[in-house]
Image (spheres, rainbow, N blue to C red):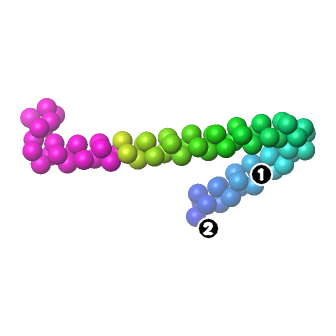
């Protein structure tokens, strides 16, 4: 395996173990709240990744336009 995959697997196992330990300590209501929090964190992470991708695409398009048409102050 690539080093990054080994690291990812190790972190995943550690996270799973931590979640299992925490789940044993929580009440049913606390587990529900924790699941809602982690779901929201996942949604926010997906949103941030999508926004970053879009901004990167825009930055690249702007750079291409600047190079092609010389409209950037940095190119003069």
Give the image location of residue 55, x and y in percent.
36, 42
Image check: 11 left or right of 1? Answer: right
Reply yes or no: does residue 62 show up in magenta.
yes
Between the residue at mark 1 and the residue at mark 2, the CA separation in whole angstroms equals 20 Å
Element under label 2?
A: loop
Residues drawn in magenta: 56-76
Q: Which residue is mark 2?
A: 1
Of the 4 image quadrants, the one containing the C terminus is top left
Can residue 48 be spotted in the picture?
yes
Is residue 13 found left or right of 48 in the rendered image?
right
Q: Which percent across, then down, holds residue 61?
A: 24, 47
5, 47: nearer the viewer: 47
Q: Dot 1: few (<14), some (14–19), or many (≥20) neighbours within 10 Å? A: few
Query: Residue 6 in the image: x percent, y percent?
Result: 65, 60
Q: Nearer the viewer, residue 5 or 66?
A: 66
Return the disc, 1 or 2, that comes first in the chain's sequence. Answer: 2
Which residue is at a point 69% across and 42% down the rendered structure image? 38
The label shown at residue 16 is: 1
Left-right relation of 76 to 5: left
């Amino acid at each position: 395996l690539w080093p990054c995959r080994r690291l990812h697997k190790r972190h995943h196992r550690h996270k799973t173990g931590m979640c299992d330990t925490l789940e044993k300590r929580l009440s049913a209501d606390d587990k529900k709240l924790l699941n809602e929090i982690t779901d929201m964190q996942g949604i926010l992470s997906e949103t941030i990744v999508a926004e970053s991708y879009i901004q990167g695409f825009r930055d690249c398009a702007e750079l291409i336009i600047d190079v092609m048409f010389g409209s950037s102050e940095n190119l003069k």
